[in-house]
Image: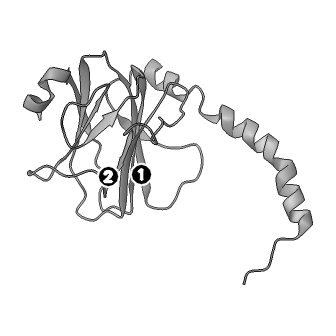
């Protein structure tokens, strides 16, 4: 068994918790708005977090702005070697979209590649009838964030906005 941490250490950590929560809560609250101001709407770009991340981890992100009858198709090559990949949606204040009640994230085990070996994911407010759909959960605007970990390349996906009724044809 592992020894228990001393009471003094636990007390120090608990006393520091409110300050840490205040810091973290404000860290990215305006992040989505800043991306929008930079013009990163319905597209993605490389993201360099302001803090240390895991070695071999690479991020991309952007915002979406979709009407009820629109969808965003995200398309990417896949690295030959890749330990992990994921794509998530957040709302306007960088809160992860409720993944428990909405299909708002996909990882490498969940997102199937198309016959041509490309990854295509559709972000939309309603299910367009495709395998890799991410539900905006009623948010007409929000953020897309992708992550590659331990991969031999770092592709930046392309995006295109289409009418929801045209998704199957566009794929």
Q: CA distance from mark 2 to mark 1?
A: 7 Å
Give the residue furthest to the right: 8
Q: Residue furthest bottom?
A: 1
Pointer 1 local density, CA inside 10 Å: few below 14, some 14–19, many at least 20 = many
Q: How many marks do you count on the picture?
A: 2
Q: Which residue is identified by label 2?
A: 154
Residue 38 visible, this orientation: no
The mark found on residue 161 in the picture is none
Can you identify the residue that label 1 sits on?
A: 58
Q: Would residue 47 be found to the left or right of residue 49 on screen? A: left
Q: Residue at x 29, y 43 (%)?
A: 156
Q: Is residue 5 visible?
A: yes
Residue 20's image quarter?
Answer: top right
* Quadrant housing the C terminus: top left
Q: Are marks 2 and 1 in contact (CB under 8 Å)?
A: yes
Q: State the residue lying farthest toward the front.
A: 101
Q: Nearer the viewer, residue 54 or 68?
A: 68
Quarter occupied by residue 88: top left
Q: How many neighbours does mark 2 have within 10 angstroms: few (below 14), some (14-19), or many (20 or more)?
A: many
């Amino acid at each position: 068994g592992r020894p228990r941490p001393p009471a003094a250490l636990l007390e120090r950590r608990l006393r520091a918790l409110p300050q840490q929560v205040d810091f973290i809560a404000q860290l990215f609250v305006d992040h989505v708005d800043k991306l929008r101001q930079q013009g990163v709407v319905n597209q993605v770009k490389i993201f360099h977090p302001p803090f240390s991340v895991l070695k071999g981890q690479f991020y991309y992100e952007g915002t979406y702005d979709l009407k009820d009858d629109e969808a965003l198709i995200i398309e990417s090559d896949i690295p030959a070697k890749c330990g992990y990949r994921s794509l998530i949606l957040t709302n306007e204040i960088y809160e992860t979209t409720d993944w428990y009640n909405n299909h708002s994230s996909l990882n490498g085990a969940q997102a199937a590649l198309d016959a041509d070996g490309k990854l295509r994911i559709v972000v939309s407010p309603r299910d367009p009838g495709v395998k890799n759909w991410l539900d905006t959960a009623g948010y007409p605007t929000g953020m897309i964030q992708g992550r590659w970990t331990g991969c031999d390349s770092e592709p930046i996906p392309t995006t295109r906005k289409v009418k929801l009724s045209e998704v199957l044809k566009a794929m």
